Image: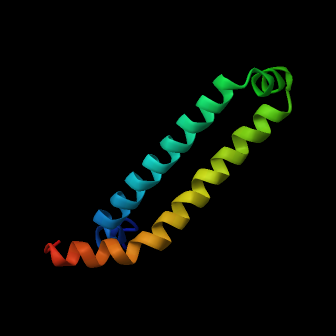
Amino acid sequence: MSNPFRSLKYLPWSALLLSAGLTVLFATAIDITLIYILASSPTIFNILNRSAVLVPVLFMAAAFGVGALSIVVTANFSARCCSALRRFGH
């Protein structure tokens, strides 16, 4: 029986970690912007505070949004990252 984890050592870990880091930075910037908007607009904050249905829907939308953002970042930067890492000898 073969080891199912053997293929993990052949993944491009440096490019995947760079993509994950960029995704976290973009998502953090978006989160900070949204928190600033909520803090400066009491009307939006009150609507979200009173809605029992809207908050879980927005939570799920945020989760899907971060997943989609990671796919976009990986697709756009993977070719650039891999070529840059090859130049530095990784």
Q: In this view of the protein, which residue sits in the foreground, 76 or 55?
A: 76
Farthest left residue in view: 89
Against 32, residue 25 (above or below) is below
Residue ID at (85%, 20%) = 50
Against 19, residue 61 (above or below) is above
Where does the image place residue 62, in percent across and percent down from the top left?
66, 45
Where does the image place residue 72, in percent across and percent down from the top left?
54, 66
Farthest front residue in view: 40
Against 69, residue 9 (above or below) is below
Instruction: Specify the quadrant of the image occupied by residue 42.
Output: top right
Q: In this view of the protein, which residue sits in the foreground, 16 or 77?
A: 77
- Is 29 on the left or on the right of 78, as rendered? right
Where does the image place residue 84, in percent across and percent down from the top left?
25, 74
Residue ID at (79%, 40%) = 57
Of the 4 image quadrants, the one containing the C terminus is bottom left
All told, the count of numbered labels is: 0
Instruction: Specify the quadrant of the image occupied by residue 86.
Output: bottom left
Q: Confirm whether residue 1 shows in the render.
A: no
- Is 69 on the left or on the right of 16, as rendered? right
Residue ID at (47%, 72%) = 76
Where does the image place residue 63, in percent across and percent down from the top left?
64, 47
How did the renderer colour the structure?
rainbow
Q: Confirm whether residue 35 shows in the render.
A: yes
- Is 70 on the left or on the right of 65, as rendered? left
Of the 4 image quadrants, the one containing the N terminus is bottom left
